[in-house]
Structures are given as structure tokens and as C-alpha cells.
Image: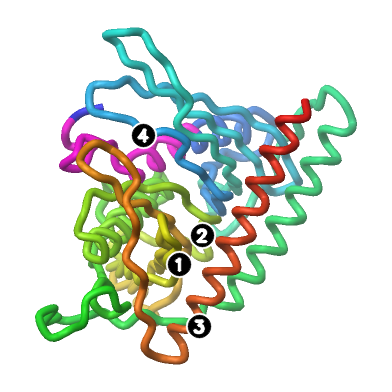
Amino acid sequence: MRPDDANIAGNVHGGTVLKMIEEAGAIISTRHCNSGQGEPCVAALARVERTDFLSPMCIGEVANVSAEITYTSKHSVEVQVNVMSENILTGAKKVTNKATLWYVPLSLKNVNKVVEVPPIQYTHKEQEDEGRKRYEEQKLERLETKQRNGDVILPVINPDRQTKEPHTVGYSQSSLIHLVGPSDCTLLGFVHGGVTMKLMDEVAGIVAARHCKTNIVTASVDAINFHEKIKKGSVITISGRMTFTSNKSMEIEVFVDADPFVDEPQERYRAVSAFFTYVSLSKEGKPLPVPQLLTESEEEKRRFEEGKGRYLQTKAKRQAQMQQAAQH
């Protein structure tokens, strides 16, 4: 990990880690999907399940990313990715991330055609049944997220933050505009999922930093849903806004909207959506209290309550997992 991979405090950007995770997932799933007798294809990222950043990674450490295919349906692949950091001076190693990603294979001859996935061999039937259950759950969640996609974050043009009250949604809201070039894209000419996630993390990080005015790090990313492909030559707008704060964390909603200008102009569409969670840290790396988000409109209050629900649900799930682990 080099200085350009990290923030000013030396912590590696969450987006950099997400990009490495996606690259590993894309390689293993593309390799698997081309192992059969079917037509040549490239695996495209469809969804990233909730990903927790278990431990920070720092400049000078070596990242080891390993990936394994854990389930296949007729048209999709589930990949489990683990990230481990190694201090090459002391030899100390620690797990920093565990992630689950879903890919669909797209034909090299026709990008709108999803090809069939060669099945994998399971060690026991329960493994396949559990995988099928995860597949059905993520499919349902993707449909629910798609229904919420009418929401819009209006970009702030030359905001005067002197006139806005600190700790409001409008004060920290941020947008980034990016022209999709060849280096951002796969062989098929569509944006790598990892590139998109890195840009989303940058915007979410700016929102968090504006709100806290301290060093901030990515704590987790809720499910990231890739609704539509983004083509080379498109202009994408990545927008982020604060939705909820607890005492020690903040939730930021991020949208990616695409404007395709090259070849076939069409209306702007929602390509990706996700929730990022950040924590505020002191110079010594200790957690700091997060300023309470001040909600002004009814819409902001509604989003705050929804965020609170997600926060409490995650907290309850984590406590249940800890109790289960203590019993074994």
C-alpha cells in the first residue's frame, strides 16, 4: 500500500480496498464462467453484500486478497473474498475485510446476453441449499432497492457553506462528476464495478469529513446494487448525503447516475446505489463522538428514521453473532 492509496492519516481508503476486492472477484468469476463449453464471456458485478472493515490497513502494509466461488445459479456466481494485511517488517497479519459479491457473465459477442454459468461441485447438499437461500434473498433485496430508485440528490452548485448551518444534510452534501474513459472499463467497454465503488467511497468520505471535520474511515458498506451497466464515454454523477448519525458512526447514502453521450444518447438513469458507514477518529486512531445530524425537512427526518432502523438491525445482528460465537 502506497501513499496515494491512503488518506492524510495513513489509513488506506475504503474505496481502494473495495476496488481490490472487486478485481479479485471479477478474475475468479470470469475464469470460472469460461471453463465450460459455452461462448466467451466477461463477468460483470451485479451486487456487493454488506462489507465490514474489520481493521484499518496502513501505508507500507501488503494486502493479500483471496477469492473463492461459493455458489452458482444458472446465470450468476457468488464469490467470497477475504483481505488480509501484512506488516512486512514484523510479519504480523490481520484480516481486514470479508466480502460477498455476485456476478453475471455477459457474452463477448452480445453484451446484452447473459450466458449460462457452469455449475460448481459442492462438498455436501447443505452447502448448495444455503447458497440457494442467499441467492433468493439477494434477488429479493435487489428488487426492493430498485423500487426506491426514484429518489434524487440534486447537485450543489458552488455552495456557500458560510451561510449553511453546520451538521445539516445540505452542509455536507457532495457530488463528483466523472467522464468514463477506456482505463475505467472492462473488455466490453463498461465500467469496472471496482472503479465505481472507489468513486462512491471518495464522495461518501467527503460528506463524512465535512460533517465531522476530523479524520474519518470507512467502517462498513451496506449492500451495493448495480442496476444498470455504465458505458464508456458516459458522464457519471456520484452524489452523497448524510442520512443518519449515531453516537459513533454516520450513514451516507450514495447514488451514481449516468448520462450516456457517446454513440446512443439517452436519458439519465440510476446505475448504482448504496449506503456507506463511517467513523470519526482522533489523531491517535481512537473513536470520536460524531456530531448529531440536524434534520430540517420531513423527508430528511424520514430518511433519518429509516437509517436508524438499519443501524439497530445491524447492531442486533452483530450482537447475536457474538453471542453465538461465545457459545461455540
Residue 176, x across and y down, in percent: 24, 66
Judge whether residue 158 can be spotted in this image: no
Q: Is residue 92 above or below residue 14?
A: above
Q: Rate crowding at label 1 as few (under 14), some (14 to 19) or many (20 or more) other CA atoms within 10 Å.
A: many
- Residue annotated with mark 3: 150
Q: Earlier in the sequence, mark 2 or mark 4?
A: 4
Instruction: Give the mark toward the camera: 4 or 3.
Output: 4
Residue 168 x, y percent position in the rendering: 30, 78
Disc 4 and disc 3 in contact, CB within 8 angstroms: no
Is disc 3 placed on a helix, strand or loop? Answer: loop
- Residue 278, given in percent of the width and then of the height, sits at 38, 54
Residue at 40%, 69% (x, y): give it. 255
Q: CA distance from mark 4 to mark 1?
A: 29 Å
The foreground one among 127 and 117 is 127
Mark 2: secondary structure: strand
- Give the residue pinned by disc 1: 271
Q: Which residue is mark 2?
A: 226
Rounded to the nearest angstrom, the CA distance separating label 2 from label 1 is: 6 Å
Image vertical order of residue 318 relative to residue 166, above or below: above
* Quadrant of residue 110 within the rendered picture: bottom right
- Where's residue 76, x and y in %? 67, 47
Q: What's drawn in magenta, residue-wise?
A: 3-24
